[in-house]
Image: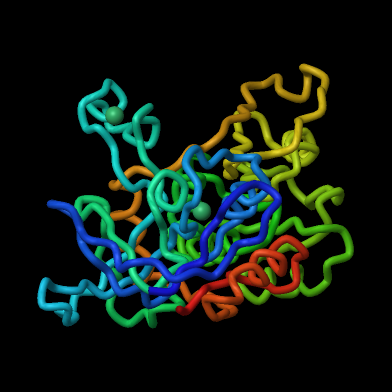
Amino acid sequence: MRAMIFEGVGRPLRLVELPIPKPAPGQLLLRVKACGVCRTDLHLLDGEVAIEHPPRVLGHQIVGAVVSDSDSPDGRRVGVPWLGWTDGECEYCRSGRENLCPRARFTGRDVDGGMAEYAVADERFCFEIPAGYPDAQAAPLLCAGLIGYRCLRMCGAPRRLGLYGFGAAAHILAQLAGHEGREVYAFTRAGDADAQEFARSLGAVWAGGSDDAPPAKLDGAIVFAPDGALVPIALRALAPGASVVCGGIHMSDIPSFPYHELWEERVVRSVANLTRRDAVEFLELAPRVPIETRVHTYGLAEAGRALEDLRAGRFTGAAVIVP
Ligand SMILES: [Zn+2]
Ligand SMILES: [Zn+2]
């Protein structure tokens, strides 16, 4: 099969021929139909999040057709997210927090992911894709959607929700938040009129630059952009008792800020990974909103270009590899 592999920090992904992986007991063999590109892939590429054992096939938003032993698709279509395996027995796993399992393995980091023609995945961590979603449109639901969903729930029940960074996750979450009757305030790079217009088209009641103060205090804010300077900015936009949730796996350093900006029970917290419960809940909600994703598709050999387009902010919505 053809696969794009990561070989080391600072090196471009490389297209290679690999044997089709053999599923171990409990694993499914999948013909990859689509695989979403995520900012985490950039952090992996840049070494901000380490890959312990390269070479590695990246990609953790896999939509795949299940291939049976006779090598013909049996018709099932499943999604594979970032959380690829947990031990099921540690104190985190046993208390509903498998996202924090210290032995967790992550798709496209610790095990090969979906930037390839085939992938294997632990069946217990595969999810049925809602009918009606084309493959490419479904892929961004699996990380951008799931992580966004977990971030929103960590905000409590905000009436006014700020989203800092209006990329793949925010464009999905804005639709869900609007469906739940929340007001979305979208913060983009200063002067990014396209992204602000995109946010308004998805129901944001206000869109502006990240340095702009919103017209009213926020009851919750999520920082998706990997820029730590946004954390105190978001904090200053919060009403008392509200939270800033950092949704990314990596962020530049957070500048110091005076304690009175945190005072009145404001909270700064991160969200790490996902649980299978998040996936089940969100994938059940998505078609009821209904969430529609805007995707830009790339061939397998173009995965490197998709990542650089993401880095440069050359598209709105989500990038998806279609091998
Ligand atoms: Zn991701
Ligand atoms: Zn565990």
- On the picture, is 20 further left or further right than 196? left
Query: Residue 175 or 144: which is nearer the viewer?
Result: 144
Residue 133 position by quadrant? bottom left
* Quarter placement of the N terminus: bottom left
Q: Please provide percent x and percent y for residue 252.
A: 74, 37
- On the picture, is 164 further left or further right than 26? right
Q: What residue is shown at x 65% (from left), y 47% (from top)?
A: 9
Q: Please provide percent x and percent y for residue 247.
A: 57, 44
Q: What residue is shown at x 44% (from left), y 74% (from top)?
A: 2
Say if residue 150 shows up in the picture: yes
Residue found at the very far right of the displayed protein: 191
Q: Please provide percent x and percent y for residue 266.
A: 64, 27
Q: Please provide percent x and percent y for residue 12.
A: 66, 60
Residue 188 position by quadrant? bottom right
Q: What residue is shown at x 20% (from left), y 59% (from top)?
A: 23
* Quarter placement of the C terminus: bottom left
Above or below: residue 315 compared with residue 21: below
Residue found at the very far top of the displayed protein: 259
Q: How is the image coloured?
A: rainbow
- On the picture, is 34 further left or further right than 271? left
Say if residue 162 shows up in the picture: no
Q: What residue is shown at x 56% (from left), y 34% (from top)?
A: 270
- On the picture, is 26 further left or further right than 110? left
